[in-house]
Amino acid sequence: MSNVSYYTEEGLKKLREELNILKDIERPKASQAIAEARDKGDLSENAEYDAAKEAQGMLELQISKLEKILSNARIINESRLDVSKVLVLSTVEVKNINSGKNMKYTLVAQTEADLKTGKISVDSPIGKGLLGKRVGEIALISVPSGSIELKIISISRE
């Protein structure tokens, strides 16, 4: 099963840049560190060599993970988004029924999420709960502290 993720052009560009840095800069550094450690003698008691090999393994894992994300990534044409219901890249204004507070979220792919700027992942409990809802509907969302009710006030593209 493929795990398709939707991104803005900017978000996808950032992922590609990160992958290029890992491959073009960090990978050669890791190889160099291994070579330097190997030149220091007996590998059976060489902690520096073991650490360099472990760091290389973690780097390769990170590269592999990014490549998988990129292979399943799709760009969303924001100008064609339907604003009648909440979708990926929708900006949603909601009212917390319990507290009466209004909040604004933009639903994005997990790697683009940044709560400080109001971007939440579509894979988060709130993101999942809002998907597919229309203006006026109430989303009952289970969160770690219990459940919250969010009324959809408006849906837009920003």
Image: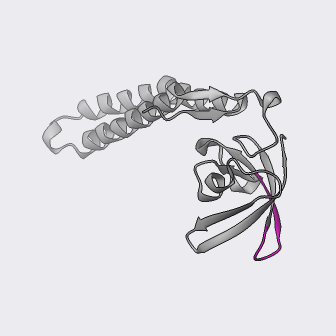
Against 54, residue 119 (above or below) is below
Q: Quadrant of residue 78?
A: top right
The mark total stands at: 0
Would you place residue 98 above or below residue 81 in this image? below
Q: Which residue occupies the foreground of this view, 45 or 134? A: 134
Q: Is residue 143 above or below residue 57?
A: below
Give the residue at x 35% y 35%.
56
Q: Pick the quarter of the image with the C terminus.
A: top right
Coordinates of residue 69 in the picture (x, y in percent)? 51, 32
Q: Is residue 120 magenta?
A: no
Along the viewing direction, whichever of 116 and 74 lies nearer the viewer: 74
Residues in magenta, as a range: 96-105
Residue sitting at 71 percent across and 68 percent down?
149
Q: Residue 51 placed where, x, y %?
A: 30, 44
> Residue 93: image x %, image y %?
82, 56
**Residue at the location (74% across, 46% down)?**
86
Q: Which one is nearer the viewer's eye here, 12 or 92?
A: 92
Drawn side of residue 101 relative to residue 68, left or right: right
Q: Quadrant of the N terminus?
A: top left
Look at the image and name its color scheme: one colour
Question: Taking 46 as reference, is 119 left or right?
Answer: right
For the point 78% across and 33% down, the residue is: 81
Horizontal arrangement in the rendering, residue 125 relative to residue 99 (left or right): left
Expressed as whole percent of the image width and height from the top left, the position of residue 100 reads 83, 74
Confirm whether the magenta stretch covers residue 100: yes
